[in-house]
């Protein structure tokens, strides 16, 4: 038994924050941000949305592409670390808002920017085990809201959004393999605290913190390792990959991994310039964009990767 992607969808909130807008907020320049990250603008969630409403909107598009009704979904997993509530989960809210039947399991997975790839791996495992037939897998975050608006080191990097994928049980591959990893020893290098209710000071200490330079080095190493292992375990060659759909944190990290895979940048799906780092949403939204504009075709081989706080890192090799 395998699982196969039958639909994808994305949602980005309408409010645009450009590099020029950021020049008015912190001491930075469009040139610095473009050169160091590749980001030109990002979308910022307003009071009309939440992580679960963005997820629901992305999921509706994925259902439409798959041509199935929400009542057919028998598993919901949302990769997120910025859902507004400790409980219930964004997964349960998505289930409610889409009218997915009562009794279907729905839950969130916290793996920061690797959240979607973790959720996809779990969904694929449920399907391979025969416990689900059609799974809704989402990556959604609003990390722009967790960053200090006066800290130029982090506020320029993050945007908000959601991406959704529906996978279905099938006899032929499908998702060839998924790989998920973590190392909690470096947790202080990239973190955001949960403010303690009623404690005003803790709200100010809670902003996201990142030692960018150190995270950068580990991200390049771990992403290179995981893509090489993925190919090896599948007896695949670098030349077998048609498209790399990487986590969109930094253009320089993406280029370094593409170079290791001997891939031309024409084979790499990038949406970082328009949306910034949307955390768990980067991979499913980039995938959706390239499927909808016809770059990704049925039968092609896709390599997905992600790296995030934890540290966590992950990959998936997929026959689309
Ligand atoms: N504008 C202008 N100058 C800036 C800005 C800015 N927005 N931000 C930092 N600088 C300055 C710094 O203060 C520093 O100045 P100094 O030398 O006077 O101290 C200088 O630029 C260089 O800073 P670095 O942090 O060394 O810059 P670097 O080239 O490493 O780029 C960046 C920073 C873009 C954050 C990069 O390190 C990066 O992309 N890191 C990895 C991010 C990542 O992969 N995160 C994982 C996923 S996120 C998640 O899971 C939540």
Image (cartoon, rainbow, N blue to C red):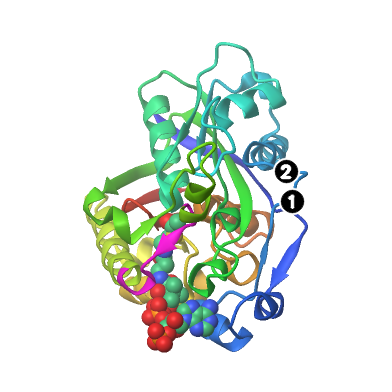
Q: Residue at x 54, y 37 (%)?
A: 198
Horizontal and vertical percent position of residue 269 = 54, 65
* Residue 140, above or below 31: above
Q: In what element is the residue under mark 2? A: loop
Front residue (pair 313, 43): 43
| In this rendering, position of residue 122 left or right of residue 266 | left
* Residue 253, above or below 80: below
Q: Quadrant of the N terminus?
A: top left
| In this rendering, position of residue 72 left or right of residue 262 | right
Horizontal and vertical percent position of residue 184 = 25, 49
Which mark, by number, is residue 49?
A: 2
Marks 1 & 2, CB-CB < 8 Å contact: yes
* Residue 70, above or below 254: above
Identify the residue under disc 1: 46
Which segment did they paint magenta?
A: 206-214
| In this rendering, position of residue 32 left or right of residue 244 | right
Direction bottom: furthest residue = 31
Magenta segment includes 213: yes
Q: CA distance from mark 1 to mark 2?
A: 6 Å
Q: Residues within 10 Å of mark 1 (few under 14, many from 20)?
A: few
């Amino acid at each position: 038994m395998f699982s196969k992607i039958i639909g994808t969808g994305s949602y980005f909130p309408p409010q645009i924050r450009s590099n020029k807008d950021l020049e008015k907020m912190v001491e930075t320049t469009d040139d610095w941000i473009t050169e160091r990250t590749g980001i030109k603008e990002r979308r910022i969630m307003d009071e009309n949305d939440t992580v679960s409403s963005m997820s629901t909107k992305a999921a509706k598009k994925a259902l439409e592409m798959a041509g199935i009704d929400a009542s057919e979904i028998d598993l919901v997993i949302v990769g997120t670390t910025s859902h507004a509530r400790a409980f219930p989960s964004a997964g349960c809210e998505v289930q409610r808002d889409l009218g997915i039947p009562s009794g279907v399991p729905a839950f969130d997975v916290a793996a920061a920017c690797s959240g979607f790839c973790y959720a996809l791996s779990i969904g694929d495992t449920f399907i391979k085990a025969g416990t689900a037939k059609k799974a809704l897998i989402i990556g959604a975050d609003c990390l722009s809201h967790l960053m200090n608006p006066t800290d130029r080191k982090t506020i320029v990097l993050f945007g908000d959004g959601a991406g959704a994928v529906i996978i279905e049980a099938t006899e032929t591959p499908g998702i060839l393999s998924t790989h998920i990893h973590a190392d909690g020893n470096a947790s202080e290098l990239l973190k955001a605290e949960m403010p303690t209710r009623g404690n005003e000071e803790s709200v100010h200490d809670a902003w996201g913190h990142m030692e960018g330079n150190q995270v950068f080095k580990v991200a390049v190493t771990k992403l290179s390792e995981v893509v090489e292992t993925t190919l090896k375990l599948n007896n695949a060659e670098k030349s077998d990959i048609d498209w790399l759909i990487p986590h969109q944190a930094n253009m320089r990290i993406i280029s370094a991994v593409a170079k290791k895979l001997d891939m031309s940048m024409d084979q790499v799906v990038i949406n970082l310039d328009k949306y910034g780092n949307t955390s768990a949403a980067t991979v499913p939204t980039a995938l959706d964009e390239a499927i909808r504009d016809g770059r990704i075709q049925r039968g092609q081989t896709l390599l997905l990767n992600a790296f995030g706080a934890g540290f966590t890192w992950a990959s998936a090799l997929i026959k689309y």
